[in-house]
Amino acid sequence: MVQETKRGLWSWAFYDWANSAFATTVMAGFFPVFFKHYWASGMAASESTFWLGMANGASGLIVALIAPLLGAVADRGGLKKGLLVFFTLLGVVMTGGLYLVGEGMWQWAATLYLLAGIGFSAGNVFYDALLPEVSTKQHLDRNSALGYGLGYLGGGLLFAGNVVATLHPEWFHLSGAEQAMRLSFASVALWWLLFTIPLMLWVKEDKPDLRLTIGPVLRDGMRQFMATFRHIRSLRTVWMFLIAYWLYIDGVGTIARMALDYGMALGFDTSVLISALLITQFVAFPAAVLFGRIGERYGARSGILIGIAIYAVLCVWSMFMREAHDFYWLAGVSGLVMGGVQSLSRSLFATLIPHGQAGEFFGFYNMMGKFAAILGPLLMGLVSLVTGSNRLSVLAVLLLFVAGGAILLRVRITAPDGREKLHES
């Protein structure tokens, strides 16, 4: 029986505050800029877009392949928190290592970024799987949204500080913007590590009655992984939801990872793009919390579909952007729905999870999300490379939102108690 406590819940939620610094400062913010203008400065814009997409896609593929098995092992051995800490340390070390990469060394930068992305994404598998350990089912929408809200706020605060240091390095006695950007990677590593400590100390995880050695855990985990795969395939509505999620969350992730690169390819000034990202973060904080309330009142699927529809409109709009204020509007509206779509998807899926199987079920959930993170960036990069037009690459993202929303509408959801809940077919 889950005992929801404020200390456990907030300690769990602050991990989002911790690792969102990587998503904002590194993934969405400074890495694409530094990659194009410093590490791959002599490379054509379309080619650097391709390699950035490849790095994002490769990290997603690796996590997608290992997540379900690791999730099953984590459940069997009571290792969700332990594996979360392991992948956090991987992400922290690789992110800090970016500070040491010199100019023109784009291969090293891409490799460290890929490994840091694995730490970030794999860590999220076990972070998501701990949600049922800290929240009762009736508060899943609200508590999931709390995590995303804190993530946007914390990631945005550190990002804002790094932006100020980059625009005004003399205030911090730095030699220039280049040094400030390099130091930003070190700051993310320290921030990520520091705010993971509450989760390490105060989040409690159900442990199996019998402590097993690593061999039996791996063997039983593999058997449980196969059993869960067969189980999920027998649940038609669950399977349809996962396919829908795979498509529409791909669009969300692709926009988050590739928006800055897209803006640079259209010729917008870097300061405009960084400012727009800050708008996204601080708008997303209250919006994510609001979407949690929408999910509790009207149902999680309704909130997700609203977000998908708005994203589809933004894709069309982004093809015709010409002025800086267009990008600001795009960032603001995107921030209104980003956290809502992510948090309601997580809480809706959590209603399906049997007690004691959160790791493996969220392993499959995150596997779909990571396979999605492969498709979108690669499609954008390939369309850009083949056509020479970054604007046309947005059509691939639009297609993902339309297809995902259409399938989600076909998922049979009943609400006898006023809340949406998926059922076996």
Image: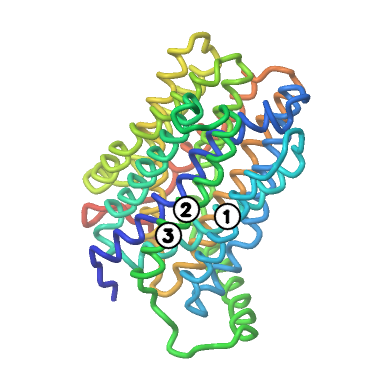
Q: Amino acid at mark 2?
A: Trp
Residue position for label 2: 192
User: For residue 229, what is the image quadrant?
Assistant: bottom right
Q: Is residue 150 above or below residue 235?
A: above
Which of these two is toward me, 174 or 408?
174
Residue position for label 1: 91
Q: Residue at 32% of width from left, 48% of height from top?
A: 145
Q: Amino acid at mark 1?
A: Gly
User: Label 3 near label 2: C-beta < 8 Å?
Assistant: yes
Q: Which mark is residue 180?
A: none
Q: Residue at 71% of width from left, 26% of height from top?
A: 383
User: Label 3 near label 1: C-beta < 8 Å?
Assistant: no
> In what element is the residue under mark 3?
loop
Residue position for label 3: 196
Q: Earlier in the sequence, mark 2 or mark 1?
A: 1
Q: Is residue 240 left or right of residue 302?
A: right
Q: How many marks?
A: 3
Residue 242 coordinates in the image, percent (x, y) = 51, 52
Circle 2 residues within 10 Å: few <14, some 14–19, many ≥20: many
